[in-house]
Amino acid sequence: MSDAVRAPRAPRTWYFFGSLCFGLLAYLALILGELLALVGVVIARHIPPTANYEHLFKPGYIDAAVWLGGLPCGLAVIWLAVRLARRQFSEYLALSWPTRQQLVLGLLIMFGVLPVLGYIGLAIGKTMDAGLIAEYRSARADGPLLLFLFLVTGCIGAPNFEEFA
């Protein structure tokens, strides 16, 4: 036998149905990770099966725990899809750092335009989501506020996973 060197296999692209299947698997992994994290919270806090769960959990803790459990699981499936395509993660998902102008524009929109739009909405009678406000207040009073803000309200966890998927 000769010691022939194998040529590297060509990279592939998943196209519509492959991406759809891996996207569904990623969301299933996210849900499974969230469920496992929720069970972990129940076990860690020594909550009996017959307890009234409504009073034992704070929304900030639950949301932070389930996102911490779910995000790595969902991202692992996306990472696997990219590796099976024989590509680099950043190249396959077209990830690149924003330019200085893009960053400044994004910050201006976030801190300038969005609050103005919120006040205009309040002025015309649109109300804010009461559930999210209650979760924020609970996390601020009893829970991990910074973790809640990063993972739940759309700062880091939720939008990044949605964009990757």
Image (cartoon, rainbow, N blue to C red):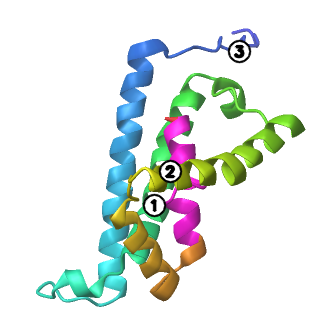
Q: CA distance from mark 1 to mark 3?
A: 37 Å
Q: Nearer the viewer, residue 151 or 22?
A: 151
User: In the rendered structure, which amino acid carries the disc numbered 3?
Assistant: Pro
Asked which secondary structure carries label 3, the reply is: loop
Q: Image height check: is 26 above or below 6?
A: below
Kindly report which numbered mark, 1 or 3, lies closer to the viewer in this rendering: 1
Residue 99 shows in the view: no
Residue, disc 1? 67
Q: Quadrant of residue 26?
A: top left
User: In the rendered structure, which amino acid carries the disc numbered 1?
Assistant: Trp
The region drawn magenta spans 147-164
Asked which secondary structure carries label 2, the reply is: helix
Q: Quadrant of residue 21?
A: top left
Q: Is residue 67 left or right of residue 155?
A: left
Q: Is residue 137 magenta?
A: no
Q: Is residue 152 magenta?
A: yes
Q: CA distance from mark 3 to mark 2?
A: 36 Å
Residue, disc 2? 158
User: In the rendered structure, which amino acid carries the disc numbered 2?
Assistant: Ala
Q: Nearer the viewer, residue 13 or 8?
A: 13
Q: Nearer the viewer, residue 63 or 49?
A: 63
Residue, disc 3? 8
- Measuring 69% from the left and 9% from the top, which residue is drawn there? 1
Q: CA distance from mark 2 to mark 1?
A: 8 Å
- Measuring 88% from the left and 39% from the top, which residue is drawn there? 100
